[in-house]
Amino acid sequence: MIPFLDLTRQHAALRAELMDAAGRVLDSARFILGPEGEALEQDLAKHVGVAHAIGVASGTDALRLALAAVGVGPGDEVITTAFSFVASASTIVMAGATPVFVDIDPATFALEAEGVARAITPRTRAIVPVHLYGHAAAIDRIAELGRTHGVAVIEDAAQAIGATYAGRPLGAWGDAACLSFYPTKNLGACGDAGMILTNRSDLAERLRRLRHHGDGGRYRHLELGYSSRLDDLQAALLRVKLGRLEAWTAARRRIAARYHDALAGLPLTLPIEREPARHVYHLYTIRHRQRDALAKALVQLGVGTAVHYPIAVPGQPMFGLPAERQWPEAARASREVLSLPCYAELTDDEVNQATRAVRTACEGL
Ligand SMILES: *Cc1c(COP(=O)(O)O)cnc(C)c1O
């Protein structure tokens, strides 16, 4: 069986370095807002080319705090995509605001820029584009819409670390950008962790306060905040992995290219990399009308797959909106998408075996 994802391979290869990093933190007994977290913030700010990075407890919290920092609250509307992990939208609700869903461009799976333009109202306070699967949304156009309308842009870059648009890293386009280090992400912790990136020093200062109970120093609390700090143990492990990220991304891109060549001509829709985006293939996601039958056949042929995501966000029970009618592309994607194994430790043989299995499965449908 080729597992859809196998983190044990990554950890086996890095074991000595990871243990060493963890030991360093245990010995220092500095676990919260310590030197490792600060070092990771600096490393990541440099990696993405932004002025500030603020470590928090998860990607979800990164979104929640970024929304709070730009002033999103009750009565506000926040525009986001109809097709993503639920946190892209649920955090808007947590902030007390109303998510306004925009349908996706079916070629890139990202929210469609003209749909964003049409959704802007006087109540719009922010736009949250998601660079889904590691491919950029039309971030140049969306950033321009934000500037024109005086609306904050918060990039959900949870799946897109290392990706670029027109040569500029994702995460460096918006007023702020949110990263997740959930274990399965391209840069994954051994637990929960997240980060907010920004070039705005006013936001950076407020975010540092918000993540620690609105603290202004010496137990003086300036505003209502959160308990959401990046822990140093995770930061130390992430610093080890950050050193490998570029090689891992290159490996993901090689695997994607091999899938692309080997699966061309089959009755499938393959993911695209649309100029001027550079994809990091957090997920290699194909589409097929008989997705469930294809997934079942692939399991029988020894290939693990996963569905990201089986329900369009507005159609989630927590929202209960008529996705089929109002966001047809998101609804169609939720029925058709299937992610194939795509991670740096996959062997050439496994990639060959997976492509043969997809071919056989397609012929049998
Ligand atoms: C993973 C993810 C999040 C949430 O991150 P957590 O670290 O799991 O809280 C948000 N948005 C997207 C698009 C994600 O993939």
Image (cartoon, rainbow, N blue to C red):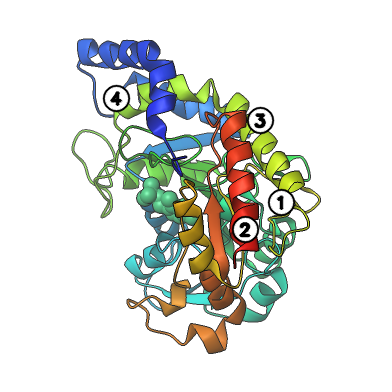
Q: Amino acid at mark 3?
A: Ala
| Mark closer to the chain start, 3 or 4 | 4
Q: Nearer the viewer, residue 280 or 355?
A: 355
Left or right of 141, for residue 119: left
| Mark closer to the chain start, 3 or 1 | 3
Instruction: Identify residue for label 2.
Output: 286
Q: Which mark is residue 250?
A: 3
Foreground disc of the pair 4, 2: 2
Foreground disc of the pair 1, 4: 1
Q: Amino acid at mark 4?
A: Leu
Asked if labels 1 and 2 touch by Cβ distance under 8 angstroms, the answer is yes
Q: Which mark is residue 263?
A: 1
Q: Which mark is residue 233?
A: 4
Give the x, y percent position of residue 151.
59, 66
Q: Amino acid at mark 2?
A: Ile
Check disc 2 and report its element: helix, strand or loop. strand
| Mark closer to the chain start, 4 or 2 | 4
Residue 156 appears anywhere in the view: no
| Mark closer to the chain start, 2 or 3 | 3
